[in-house]
Amino acid sequence: MTRPPAHDLAAEQAVIGAALLAPSVVADLAATLTPADFYRPAHARLWETLCHLHSDGQPIDPIAVAAHLTDTGNLGTVGGAPYLHTLIATVPTAANAAHYARIVAEHARRRQVADLGTYLTENAESSNDVAGLVATGRAMLDQASEGTQWPPLIPLGDHRHLPDFPSHALPAWVAEMVHGVAEFTQTPVDLAGCIALAALSTAAGGRAEVEVRGSWREPANLFTVVVLPPGSRKSAVFAAMTGPLLAAEKVLVERTKPAIVEAELAARVAGKAAEKAAIAAANADASGRDTLLAEATDAAMTADAVTVPVLPQLVADDVTSEEAASLLAEQAGRLAVLSPEGGIFATIAGRYSGTPNLEVFLKGHAGDMLRVNRRSRNPEHVEHPALTLGLAVQPDVLRDIADMPGFRGKGLLARILFSLPENTVGRRKIGADPVPDTVTDTYTSNLGALVGSLADWTDPAVLCLTPDANERVLDIERAVEPRLAPGGAWGHIVDWGSKYTGAVVRIAGLIHLAEHLRDGWGKPVTADTIDRAALLGDYYAAHALAAFSDMGADKATHNARHIAAWIERTGATTFTKRELFRAVKSNQIPTVADLDPALSLLEAHGHLRQLDPPERPRAGGRPPSPSYLVHPETHQPNATVHPLPDTRRTA
């Protein structure tokens, strides 16, 4: 039971090496050998690539294959270009390619038989449908003996294998808090990590910007949205990660109150003086009126010039666009909307006004001048608004916002860094250790210091890049541009992808300020900081592709993804329709009939194969439930979204 599955790595290497030496053999072998027949995932990926290049009439040699794998982001996953030459060196002769292929296929059949034994062993005691179990076993055995081939998997665009949040890219004091909160709440690290970035954005937004080159500057504020279902403890994580911001806000309020009292008193005194001067001018005779009128005018202007500070406010919750604009004007252009719910989207879409109002959010992200008109006062404008958005929403909200007027067309969705972490509900550890006091105290102290050090800045602090850091940004731009072309990896989300480099620069600015809490504006942003921000950029790029895929998917696709997630979570290799319905029944899939479109889609994409149903029982017996066989590659998935090439350089 502990022996590894049947395989022969030397034969697998020989098949691929022979194909690289003699590309003509691919046509003969592709008819009988599929990627699923290879035991090593890297070999499966290579064989899939060779078959793809052959079908497209493209050359098959180490250089062409390496170039194709580089373009798709898979070169590193198969061992790099040197491994291709290693494969060629292992081939005694390409003339024996068919013999090597038979060895690979035979081992694949043996693994199928072994899977059958495992399946029967696991289900023999628990199954209530013995006849169905026997029929399934026979079908699996027939397929193994006949060498029935699986077609290549066609991705559903799902996000079951998205990258984990790279918390190591954050400053150490932030990363420790992120991990401590994630452990205590038993939530994905992604949730605390994204909110941590929103907290840094709240502390620095509107007070700093990164100068890339020329007139290109990026303000240090972000829009982040984490997608998790109900019951995921989003509120607890929000409270832990944003609580220090409220404490820092309280400190600012206490520090400002004396100035408010002084200004209010000065305003009253100046007002009384202006009123007295006006009365004197009104009662003067013609000979002295001009002088007194001039004095009254000066007094009125002096009174009007007295500005009473407003109480500082860093964070708002569910505000309307109009309220957000007013708060930005009052708070000198800095505000954060942080909430463990997604109600703000419906609000700005016009839930109360009936008319969408996205302007404050669009300009608040870009830093474009915002003018606020009020009935009681003259129009005000914010020269450099910086609005932070940090939300945790339910999956239904993600699907709804794609249909909200203007959200995609006007560019709001293009400004959001999406995170779609795997839900931990049902696998959480009971009695997890709380966050150590030292970690919490350090996080609270440092976040408060960052808020305090930038609170009095009126013009944004400008963060410059070192020459090496600028080269890193250029490398990112070079890597991104081909992906934005029609047919490129990001061609369908070009609006989001066009802002990708700017988002990386913004993240780098926040990392820099968090590591230089009191003097970050006096130091340049280094290449290492850009590299760490690029790791977070890779993460958000993968999750953005999944998010936009989710937003554009229909009900059948959503249900198919839900079923695929259940298959992977349970490790199922076969199942009956009845078993599946018992496991996934919900408001989303209320009846057995709702499974049919999703199962058909999974079959069409090669994820499942319906087995021949068992013979119908005698009269009065329960009708058999259709059985399905799961594609072997389902439990050995290859990532469908690849990061940008590593921009780091070596000496």
Image: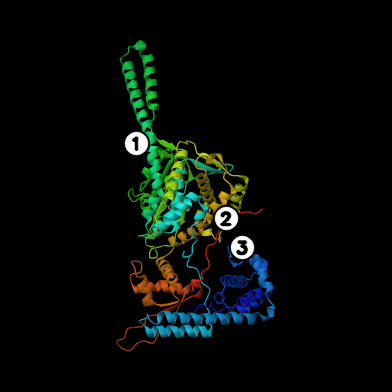
Callout 3: SS: helix
> What's the amino acid at mark 1?
Arg
Callout 1: SS: loop
CA separation, marks 2 and 1? 46 Å
Looking at the image, residue 34 sits to the left or right of residue 597; the answer is: right
Using the image, determine if residue 145 lies above or below residue 400: below
Residue highlighted by disc 2? 480
Give percent across and percent down for residue 379: 40, 35
Looking at the image, residue 532 sits to the left or right of residue 126; the answer is: right
Label 2 crowding class (10 Å Cα cut-off): few <14, some 14-19, many 20+? many
Give percent across and percent down for residue 222: 47, 48
* Foreground residue among 152 and 439: 439
Residue highlighted by disc 1? 375
Callout 2: SS: helix
What mark, if any, has residue 558 been given in the picture?
none
CA separation, marks 3 and 1? 59 Å
CA separation, marks 2 and 3? 14 Å
| Residue drawn at point x = 58 percent, y = 52 percent | 477
Quadrant in the rendering for residue 6: bottom right
Looking at the image, residue 335 sits to the left or right of residue 15; the answer is: left
> What's the amino acid at mark 2?
Val
| Residue drawn at point x = 60 percent, y = 48 percent | 469
Badge nearest the viewer, 2 or 1? 2
* Foreground residue among 46 and 291: 46
Answer with mark 2 or mark 3, whichever residue precedes in sequence: 3
Badge nearest the viewer, 2 or 3? 3
Answer with mark 3 or mark 1, whichever residue precedes in sequence: 3
What mark, if any, has residue 70 been given in the picture?
3
Label 1 crowding class (10 Å Cα cut-off): few <14, some 14-19, many 20+? few
Quadrant in the rendering for residue 525: top right
Give percent across and percent down for residue 281: 33, 16
